[in-house]
Image (cartoon, rainbow, N blue to C red):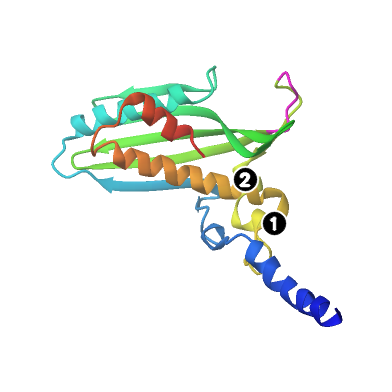
Amino acid sequence: MKKLLLSLLLCLPVLVLAKEKDDSKYLAGAVPEENGIVKFQQTFSVPGKSKQEIFNVMSAYVQQVVDAAQPGQRTRILQSDAAGGEIVARIEEWMEFKKKPLYWDRTRFRYQLIVQCSDGKCRMEITQISYYYEEDMEGNNGRTYKAEEWITDKEALNKAKTKLLLGSAKFRRKTVDRVETLFETAREAFETPVPEKKRATQLIKE
C-alpha cells in the first residue's frame, strides 16, 4: 500500500505539468507596441487585384465584423474612403473566458480596426484596445482596462518573461487569438467566397 501511495505521489508533478497550458505563443513579443501603444499590424499580398477590388472585398469584410459585434454607438464604421483605400471601424464585441451554468466570465472587447488598401496588397491594424470587465446586469459599474496597462510584456509577464501573470493572462491569450482570427479571416475573404451567415459565425467564434 505504501509503495502504491509513493508511486502516486511521484506521478503528481507529471500530472500537474500535463495540465498546464502551453503559453509559449503568448510570451515576450506576442503583444507588439509602437511608441508605447499596443498595435497589431499585418500586411498581406493580394496578387492581381487592384486597390478598388481589394477595397470592395475588405469593405464587405469589415461590415461583417461590425454586424457580428455588439450593436450600439461603440460599434460603427468611422470612415470608408474608396479613393484613398482606407476603412476605419470602431468595434465592441464580447470576449468569453469561461461559461458554466450560473457563471459566465466575459468582457467587452473594444478596439479600432484600420484597413489600408493598395494595388496588390492590404494592410490591417488593430489598436486602441480596451476591456470593460465585471459589469453588473444592467451593463454598469464595470472596470475599464487599457491594453497598455494590462496585456503588455511589462504588465502581463513575470520578470523573467517566462510566465503570464494570473490576473491578465486570460485577456492576453484571448486578445492574441482574436487578432489572429481577424487577420486570418480577412485573408480568407479573397479566397473561395463563404456565405455571409457562416462568415459572421466564424468572426465571433472563440
Name the residue: 86% across, 80% down: 2
- Residue pointed to by mark 1: 165
Q: Is residue 158 above or below residue 78?
A: below
Q: How many marks?
A: 2
- Residue pointed to by mark 2: 171
Precedes in sequence: disc 2 or disc 1: 1
Residue lying furthest right? 2
User: Is residue 136 within the magenta segment?
Assistant: yes
Judge by depth and name the residue closer to the eye, 62 or 144: 62
Using residue 50 as the reference point, say whether residue 82 is left or right of it: right
**Magenta region's main secondary structure?**
loop
Q: Residue 44: x percent and y percent?
A: 29, 47
Q: Residue 156: x percent and y percent?
A: 65, 55
Q: Is residue 147 above or below residue 135?
A: below
Element assignment for label 2: helix
User: Is residue 87 within the magenta segment?
Assistant: no
Stretch of the chain drawn in magenta: 133-138
Q: Residues within 10 Å of mark 1 (few under 14, many from 20)?
A: some
Q: Residues within 10 Å of mark 2 (few under 14, many from 20)?
A: many
Element assignment for label 1: loop
**Residue 48 visible from this viewpoint:** yes
Tell me the amino acid under the disc marked 2: Phe
**Residue 84 visible from this viewpoint:** no
Q: CA distance from mark 2 to mark 1?
A: 11 Å
Label of residue 184 in the image: none
Judge by depth and name the residue closer to the eye, 13 or 48: 13
Using residue 38 as the reference point, say whether residue 123 is left or right of it: left
Q: Residue 164: x percent and y percent?
A: 65, 58
Name the residue: 62% across, 45% down: 171
Tell me the amino acid under the disc marked 1: Leu
User: Residue 123: which quarter of the image?
Assistant: top left
